[in-house]
Amino acid sequence: MAENAGEPTPDELLAIAVRIAREAADTARRMRTEAITDVQTKSTDTDVVTAADKAVERQVVEALRRERPGDGVLGEEYGDSTATTGGVRWILDPIDGTVNYLYGLPQYAVSLAAEVNGTVVAGVVRNAATGDEWTATRGGGAWRGSRRLGGSARTTLDQALVGTGFGYDPERRAHQGAVLAGLITRVRDIRRFGSAALDLCMAAEGSLDAYFEKGLNAWDHAAGGLVAAEAGLRVSGLDGRAAGKDMLVAAPPAIFPALHDVLVELDAAGGP
Ligand code: LIP
């Protein structure tokens, strides 16, 4: 394809994302034993990056450059590695759930989304350990393999199994812990699986009834957020804000208001 010959469709972008994410997941799985011997830290001593996070990101960026030379790429490890000349930008988390990857817990994923003129229109999340895969296109629905997803049918917060996560900064964790203490008596139970991308996909398929987290970056939720939204969940911040670093809440319309209001009451978007 010559230099971005016209705007690609969401399905065309999804096909590229799925092919590249599958190859990247294979690399992550193959490299693990060796990669966990080369570990560095980022924002804190517990915020780790392995050789595989970097190698997988380089592999994906190179593949995207070959297929769509003019597109931009925003990745967790190398940031904005390619300036965009068209309207398409890719948002990549090479290994979401790096701590799980380090410990060999099979809950880590390649997350790749395509954004056109600032709107995410296609996304794939592939669990690199299990091969499970979730996809979505804007207006085209959310899928796990060939199964269309519709979220949880739960209707009350007190019966909801809610996923969440914690940042790496101790002060933020203290605030998030206090929010959890206030929330835990108001829900069925809490799950902390360690990958926002996979948590959002589990909420999309109803394995979790809802999910929320403070402090997420675009690469943690771009693809999973589209999967959740296309499964019919409300995905946003608090008080009418868009989902972002302050807060991301994903829940079916039936329980979103109750969860939202408890999170506001507990100042979940506040703190460090
Ligand atoms: C992880 C997120 C997770 C969060 C972790 C971490 P990473 O991303 O997916 O939801 O709780 O603290 O940020 O660092 O594995 O790419």
Image (cartoon, grey):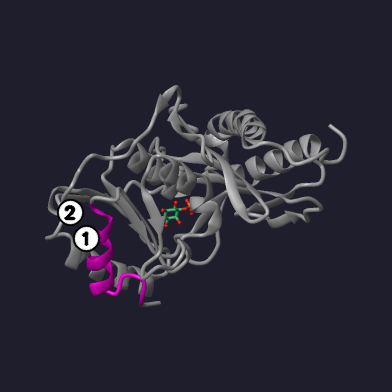
Q: Position of residue 251 (x, y in %)?
A: 31, 51
In the depicted view, which residue is nearer to us: 47 or 249?
249
| In this view, 176 is above or below 119 | below
Q: Amino acid at mark 2?
A: Leu
Q: Position of residue 95 (x, y in %)?
A: 53, 44
Residue 165 in view of the camera: no
In the displayed structure, does residue 123 sit left or right of residue 198?
right
Q: Position of residue 114 (x, y in %)?
A: 63, 44
Q: Image quadrant for the N terminus?
A: top right
- Name the residue at the right extreme: 2
| Magenta stretch: includes residue 114 | no
Name the residue that disc number 1 marks. Answer: 258
Disc 1 and disc 2 in contact, CB within 8 angstroms = yes
**Residue 56, image quadrant:** top right
Mark 2 residue CB less than 8 A from any atom of ligand 1: no
Q: Quadrant of ligand 1?
A: bottom left
Q: Residues within 10 Å of mark 1 (few under 14, many from 20)?
A: some
| Magenta stretch: includes residue 260 | yes
* First in residue order: circle 1 vs circle 2: 2
Residue at position x 59%, y 31% from top? Answer: 18
- Name the residue at the top extreme: 146
Mark 1 residue CB less than 8 A from any atom of ligand 1: no
Residue at position x 24%, y 71% from top? Answer: 178
Residue 84 in view of the camera: yes
Q: Amino acid at mark 1?
A: Ala
In the displayed structure, does residue 80 sit left or right of residue 147?
right
Name the residue that disc number 2 marks. Answer: 157
Residue at position x 62%, y 32% from top? Answer: 11
Which span is picked out in magenta?
Answer: 255-270
| In this view, 266 is above or below 216 | below
Q: Say which element carries label 1.
A: helix
